[in-house]
Image: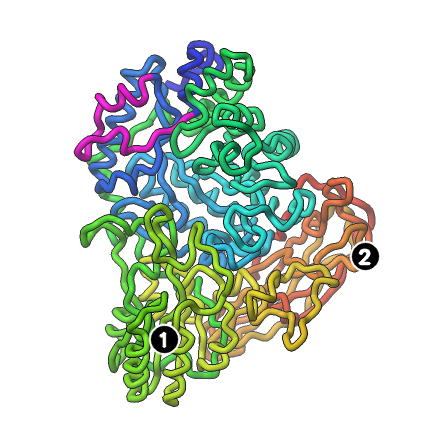
Amino acid sequence: MQPDVDTLLERLSLTEKVAQLGSVRIGTLLEDGSFSPVRAREAIPDGVGRVTRVGRESGLDPPALARAVADLQAFLRTETPQGVPAFVREEGLCGYAGRRGATVPQPIGVASSWDPALARDLARAVATQLRAVGCRLTLAPVADLGVDPRWGRTEETFGEDPALASRLTAAVVAGLRDGGVDPTLKHFAGHGRPAGGRNRAAPTASLSEMRDADLRPFRAGVAAGAPSVMAAYNAVDGVPCHANERLLTDLLREEWGFAGTVVSDGRGIEQLAEEHGVVPDRRAAGVAALSAGVDVELPETECFGDRLVTAVERGELPESLVDRAVGRHLRQKVAAGLFDDPAPDPDAAAEAFGRDAVHALARRAARRSQVLLANDGVLPLSGDESVAVVGPNADAPRALLGNYSYAGAEGADAGPDVTTPLAALRERVDVAGHARGCGVRPSPDDERGIERAAALAADAEVAVAVVGGRSGIDVERDSSGTAGEALDRATLGLPGRQATLVERVAATGTPVVAVLVGGRPFAVPDLTETAAATVAAWLPGQAGGEAVADVLLGADPGGRLPVSLPRTAGHLPVDYRQPPLSRGGYVFHDGGPLFPFGHGESYAAFAYGEVSVATGEMAGDGRTTVSVPVENVADRPGSEVVQLYARDPVSSVVRPERELVGFRRLDLGAGERRTVRFDLPAAALGCHDADGRLTVEPGRFDLAVGRSAADTRGTATVEVTDPGFPDRRLVAESDVE
């Protein structure tokens, strides 16, 4: 039975209250793979708020983990003073990060699909596995914008654009909630635009500037019902996010009306003392974080717990602030149904983990996530060619997986069942041979391997070079990655000697299809000149090899870039939402991107008709309809992403030259013609003025429909007749007739 939170709060002692604000790792509570009441009595005698990283750190199969979680919740119900259940959580960024968990495409790939419905389906599937083992909460989605590709965590984001990221963030929130799992939006705020691309560095924008960009996906996630937000490691305007009352209380709660919990990033509170240096010690760090609006400490209790008890007893912290945080956390537990149904069913847990349960969806998502960057006609393959398969990622299962996936335990069935590109191609074409060529990181054997790969390619009709990076999956133990958390880069070319590998293979005269596997956008102008075709496959997950083969053999990928690809790291920032004065070039170099935001080729061809606007005028709180017919003029099916951009030519504040305000992915049969209708609210055209108010200013707005931010197929204008003051910026909804 669900308790009354206020009554429960009155019954809790101060020690029991702060226990609800803390966390413990699952390993503390296990012995020989089972829950240990003896260890629990020592570690959590007064209860606990959350139990963390239960899948990765336990290494247990789903039924065994479900049994341990059920025993844990029974212990909390019967042997702690007030019987409060815990939130049990595991990562769910690209799948349940535990033994046998399915791994779906990393978010940067999902963003490339431009398909919110697909994102929701994937999140729902992930939630099914999380809930099966008793995880009712996860630390996803990442709502940060991925603005600087040097940053190792770009792969976790939905790209550089706030409109696209907002739609996908809201879709993932909805999908996780569909599956009975509480999402957590992270990292609030500015984490995705760190100075120099260095993880945890201060963002390259003020809080005011981020209102029209970085904060929008978080606002969309809150509006979609996300009950939890994670603070970021970095400082904003000189104040660390974990101690930033302006950010966590004034903006998030009072301005946006958020009523859920704010949680720390891992050890983010203690960094206030030990990294940021804004407080003298961990007790002061706990006081500062709680006072600013952080409610729960992760991944284990270091600055809350006894230190908060001492702070209250010494008059350094009002107990009312403890009550405020505990009340929020208890209300989230009530809303999640933990008091009624806290434990999983161990006997049923395995049902969610059969290969077929998620694999077909993962393959479809991986296929729709790929972006055909360039193609001189070599693709699609006919299937009759002899194919040489080369590259360090061609037969490396782990290379297909994003960070925060489970791939660290021993045993053949520990991680997901991954099909590599080489294995998938061998089932469908004449593979003349395979040569790794070189490693993702430099190796003394690379020269010999490159020679062997070139010799193999010389005797084939086509060479498929699967190159790119490798995500550091375990941020605490894995030093072999080239991207991921704390794996930032100063350069953006292919790491190691992979560029030389592609050059040598192409020099044989055999056409090369380059498949880029990795979570970071690469700056590879020489590769795209050398290769006959280039495909960005991102980190496609367990079905990635099959999906790559699907695309090479004729399935139209339909993906579009959610980021702008730079020519070199020296061109950064290159994201398309730059104001006009930021678009200058360089001596000897074009300042534009190698490939623009929204770009992607197709095996089909599409013709756009005239853009029409239902009414040329609308009020500041009104809306209009923008329509455009699109026809597949090819003799094969294809997938197109119709993109609607807006520009405010005269504004009281400097605005981007062009901003995405709506999009629609279309799957069209040969010769099929459909009309896309965008329901465009004036709120999509707004911006925050110099006083921080969200305003739709009167005047003319230029609209453009196209295939990318740099490829316009039709234009129109709309006049806003009077100012509007919306609650938040929206994204145009669309339908098709």
Magenta residues, start to end? 22-45
Q: Residue at x 42, y 83 (%)?
A: 378
Q: Is residue 134 above or below residue 12?
A: below
- Residue 699 location, x and y as percent? 82, 54
Q: Is residue 14 above or below residue 131?
A: above
Quick one: SS at disc 2?
loop
Q: Quadrant of the C terminus?
A: bottom right
Could you tell whether 599 is left or right of 16 in the image? right
The figure's colour scheme reads rainbow
Could you tell whether 520 is left or right of 388 in the image? right
Quick one: SS at disc 1?
strand
The amino acid beneath tag 2 is Val
- Residue 10 location, x and y as percent? 46, 10
Q: Is residue 535 above or below residue 413?
A: below
- Residue 171 location, x and y as percent? 49, 47
The amino acid beneath tag 1 is Ala
Q: Residue at x 28, y 30 (%)?
A: 28
Q: Residue at x 50, y 81 (%)?
A: 529
Is 415 part of what is drawn in magenta?
A: no
Instruction: Choose between 348 and 610: the one closer to the eye.
Output: 348
- Which label lies toward us, 2 or 1? 1
- The residue under label 2 is 650
Q: Is residue 482 above or below residue 25?
A: below
- The residue under label 1 is 465
Q: Which mark is residue 120?
A: none
